[in-house]
């Protein structure tokens, strides 16, 4: 069974940093691109970032987080990360990690399984 | 940046057909995916690559894409279909994924 278990959310002051983790199980983690999506309270979905499968050598960011957030993965630990810095009030949201539906293309945010979400509050 | 516009809400009676549109400039040249999100839950993929369904998604869910509009159609609507629906595309000009503004489907 595919599982994505998220951790690392919480309350942080503006300008602070936080690292989110997403521990994967039930599938060959290194074969799939992984994505972060966020949702501000009462708002719609916002794509944040995507990282390619095996080497994690390709990644893309939304303009709203580029230069402040860093996506990475450790395929030996089956874990996806999102390092967030210079946090702003507008970064307050539930953050979801998600697994690609297919192994190809190597970078894709077409996703089938999602984590439970973790709330980040910047205040 | 590429913008996807959806109607804020769609209301439909049980057993009828709901159509949710997703408008974007020449969206027919892109591949569209659709997600369903119920309150307090993570999104669920219901249609991908314009019209394909993931395993486990009922045939009642279908999609189309042409010109400047993509459409998610839900046939024989059930109370359990009440949710928010989002379209998604890859914008190659910016190397960004984009979600639509979202549509709340209410079953009367």
Image (cartoon, coloured by chain):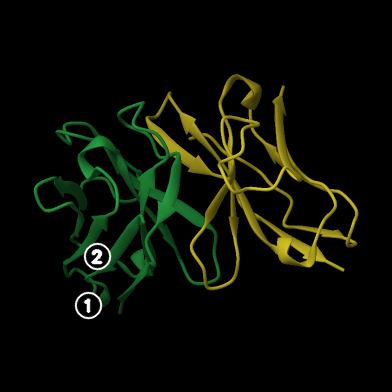
Q: Nearer the viewer, residue A76 or B83?
A: A76
> Which of the image's four quarters has the C terminus of chain A?
bottom left
* The residue positioned farthest toward the front in the image shown: A1
* The residue positioned farthest toward the top in the image shown: B29
Secondary structure under tag 2 reads: loop
> Which of the image's four quarters has the N terminus of chain A?
bottom left
Residue B10: percent from the left, percent from the top?
Answer: 80, 57
Residue A90: percent from the left, percent from the top?
Answer: 38, 65
Rendered shade, chain A: green
* Both marks 1 and 2 on one chain: yes
Q: Kindly indicate the quadrant of the structure image that contains residue B63.
A: top right
Q: Residues within 10 Å of mark 1 (few under 14, many from 20)?
A: few
Would you name the residue on which mark 1 appears? Answer: A13
Q: Residues within 10 Å of mark 2 (few under 14, many from 20)?
A: many
Q: Kindly indicate the quadrant of the structure image that contains residue A49.
A: top left
Residue B21 lies left or right of residue B102; in this view the side is right
* The residue positioned farthest toward the left in the image shown: A76
- Chain letter belonging to callout 1: A
Residue A54 higher or lower than B58, as above or below? above
Check whether the beta carbons of the residues at disc 1 and disc 2 lie within 8 A of each other.
yes
User: Label for residue B72?
Assistant: none
Would you name the residue on which mark 2 appears? Answer: A87
Residue at image point 72% right, 65% down: B80
Residue B79: percent from the left, percent from the top?
Answer: 78, 67
Rendered shade, chain B: yellow
Secondary structure under tag 1 reads: loop
């Amino acid at each position: 069974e595919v599982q994505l278990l998220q951790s690392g959310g919480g309350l942080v002051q503006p300008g602070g940093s936080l690292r989110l983790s997403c521990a994967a199980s039930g599938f060959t983690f290194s074969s799939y691109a992984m994505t972060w999506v966020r949702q501000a309270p009462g708002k719609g979905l916002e794509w944040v970032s995507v990282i390619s499968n095996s080497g994690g050598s390709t990644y893309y960011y939304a303009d709203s987080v580029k230069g402040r957030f860093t996506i990475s993965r450790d395929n030996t630990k089956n874990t996806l990360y999102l390092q967030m810095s210079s946090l702003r009030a507008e970064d307050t949201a539930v953050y979801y990690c998600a697994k690609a539906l297919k192994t190809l293309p190597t970078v894709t945010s077409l996703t089938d399984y999602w984590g439970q979400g973790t709330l980040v509050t910047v205040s | 940046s590429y913008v996807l516009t959806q109607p804020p809400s769609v209301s439909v009676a049980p057993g009828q057909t709901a159509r949710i549109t997703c408008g974007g400039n020449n969206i027919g040249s892109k591949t569209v995916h659709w997600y369903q999100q119920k309150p307090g839950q993570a999104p669920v993929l219901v249609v991908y690559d314009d019209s394909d369904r993931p395993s486990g998604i009922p045939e009642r869910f279908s999609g189309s894409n042409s010109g400047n509009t993509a459409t998610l159609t839900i046939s024989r609507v059930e109370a359990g279909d009440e949710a928010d629906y989002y379209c998604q595309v890859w914008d190659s000009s910016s190397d960004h994924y984009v979600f639509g503004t979202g549509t709340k489907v209410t079953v009367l």
